[in-house]
Amino acid sequence: MACQEISFDRRNAKLGTMEAFTIVLSLTQLVYILTIKAGGHGPVQVERHNALGR
């Protein structure tokens, strides 16, 4: 797993922060893609009423 490769010594603090940030963003993007795929069952029918009653 990618998070096991992060070392937290002082010299690589910025690199570790960037790696952790990249992992979090990747997981967030994966969740968004799965959510969009799960909800993609076609268009939703919307019932519209005309103000004139037609």
Image (tube, grey):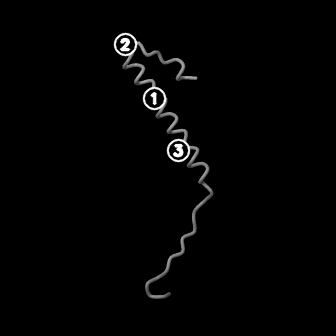
Residue at the (50%, 38%) spot, across then down: 28
Q: Is residue 9 left or right of residue 35?
A: left
The relative height of residue 38 versus residue 16 in the rendered view (above or below) is below
Residue at the spot of label 3? 32
State the quadrant of the N terminus: top right
Residue at the (48%, 18%) spot, across then down: 6
Q: What whole-number distance in Å separates the C-alpha atoms at marks 2 and 1?
A: 19 Å
Residue at the spot of label 1? 22
Q: Position of residue 46 (x, y in %)?
A: 54, 70
Q: Earlier in the sequence, mark 3 or mark 2?
A: 2
Q: Amino acid at mark 3?
A: Tyr
Residues at circles 2 and 1 in contact by the CB criterion of under 8 Å = no
Q: Position of residue 37 (x, y in %)?
A: 60, 48
Mark nearest the camera among 3 and 2 is 2
Residue at the spot of label 2? 10
Q: Amino acid at mark 1?
A: Thr
Residue at the (43%, 16%) spot, across then down: 8
Q: What whole-number distance in Å separates the C-alpha atoms at marks 1 and 3?
A: 15 Å
Q: What whole-number distance in Å separates the C-alpha atoms at marks 3 and 2?
A: 34 Å
The relative height of residue 34 versus residue 39 in the rendered view (above or below) is above
The residue furthest front is: 9
Q: Amino acid at mark 2?
A: Arg
Q: Secondary structure at mark 2?
A: helix
Q: Quadrant of residue 21?
A: top left
The relative height of residue 13 versus residue 29 in the rendered view (above or below) is above
Q: Is residue 44 left or right of residue 13?
A: right
The residue furthest bottom is: 53
Q: Earlier in the sequence, mark 1 or mark 3?
A: 1
Q: Secondary structure at mark 1?
A: helix
The relative height of residue 52 versus residue 41 in the rendered view (above or below) is below
Report crowding for label 3: few under 14, some 14 to 19, many 20 or more residues within 10 A (C-alpha). Answer: few
